[in-house]
Image: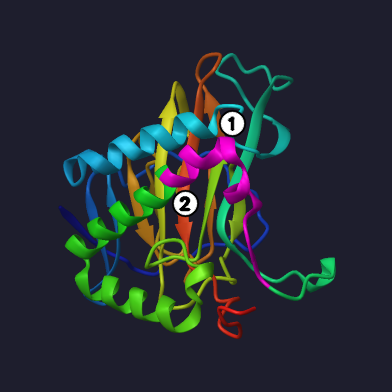
């Protein structure tokens, strides 16, 4: 595995800026270090570390794209390979696990995603839960100290019913969704996200971190483990190279919103 020491770069990117298309410069298995300490990693193909994880990612991806899983839909224009900007690519997401309080919606308490209660979505939920556990085992293998720290932080800050695995509280699957530059301020500091990518006949969807001048490839079956609260980052546009092309990410993340609540809340 290649080692990349993260070094602060000068840039003018601020939160809310649109993330443009950027070719990735992290395209092989890489351990990221900061001042010599490991802070994350990128794996180009998770099947090298866990054949089960690759199988579960295939199942979760297929189920998400079916009609069996309820999703939040949206439509945004996307540049196809032929340059026709009028075409649109379907975009949607599905959230699992803990949902934080939303006082502005008159719900001052956390809850669990309603997708868990949908019978037709059970294969998707099961595949994602098992995939979370497999991804945790990969983290434990490559960054054992971070694994132990994150498990302890989640156990301390999130009641069991609001957890998704041992290292996370929640999960979101993003189909064809890019993202403006942002920082995951709702995440529990000291913890990291897992992002597993599935894609077919498309380019883009790469994670860019301007603080360090890196853009990480969103290759099919790849996995990125990184503390999303630490830096401003964005996701480059997803551009299908033929009809039906897509990029889907299966994301597991740790929210800090549950620390004031108990199993009875």
Residue count near mark 1 (Cα–Cα under 10 Å), binned few <14, some 14–19, many ≥20: some
Find residue 49 and report its horizontal and vertical position in percent: 18, 47
The answer to which image quadrant residue 140 occupies is bottom left
Q: Is 153 situated left or right of 254 in this image?
A: left
- The answer to whether residue 27 of the structure is visible from this angle is yes
Residue 34 seen from this side = no
* 112 in magenta: yes
- Residue 117 drawn in magenta: yes
Q: Secondary structure at mark 1?
A: loop
Q: Nearer the viewer, residue 135 or 228?
A: 135
SS type, badge 2: strand
Q: Where in the figure is residue 121, as x and y percent of width and height?
A: 55, 39
Asked whether 195 or 28 is in front, the reply is 195
The stretch in magenta equals: 110-126
In the displayed structure, would residue 76 be above or below residue 9? above
Q: Is residue 93 left or right of residue 39?
A: right
């Amino acid at each position: 595995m290649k080692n990349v020491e993260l070094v602060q770069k000068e840039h003018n990117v601020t939160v809310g800026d649109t993330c443009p298309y950027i070719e990735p410069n992290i395209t092989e298995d890489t351990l990221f270090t900061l001042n010599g300490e490991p802070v994350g990693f990128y794996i180009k193909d998770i099947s090298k570390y866990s054949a089960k994880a690759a199988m579960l990612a295939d199942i979760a991806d297929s189920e998400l794209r079916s009609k069996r899983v309820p999703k939040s839909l949206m439509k945004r224009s996307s540049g196809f390979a032929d340059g026709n900007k009028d075409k649109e690519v379907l975009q949607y997401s599905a959230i699992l696990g803990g949902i934080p309080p939303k006082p502005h919606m008159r719900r001052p308490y956390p809850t669990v995603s309603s997708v868990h209660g949908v019978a037709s979505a059970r294969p998707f939920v099961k595949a994602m839960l098992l995939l979370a556990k497999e991804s945790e085992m990969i983290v434990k293998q490559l960054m054992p100290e971070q694994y132990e720290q994150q498990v302890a932080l989640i156990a301390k800050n999130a009641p069991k019913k609001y957890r998704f695995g041992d290292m996370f509280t929640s999960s979101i699957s993003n189909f064809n969704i890019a993202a403006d530059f942002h920082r995951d301020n709702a995440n529990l500091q000291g913890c990291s996200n897992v992002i597993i990518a599935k894609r077919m006949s498309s380019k883009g969807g790469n994670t860019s971190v301007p603080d360090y001048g890196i853009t990480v490839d969103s290759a099919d079956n790849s996995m990125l483990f990184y503390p999303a609260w630490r830096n401003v980052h964005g996701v480059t546009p997803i551009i299908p190279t033929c009809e039906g092309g897509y990029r889907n990410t299966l994301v597991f993340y740790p929210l800090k919103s549950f620390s004031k609540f108990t199993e009875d809340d």
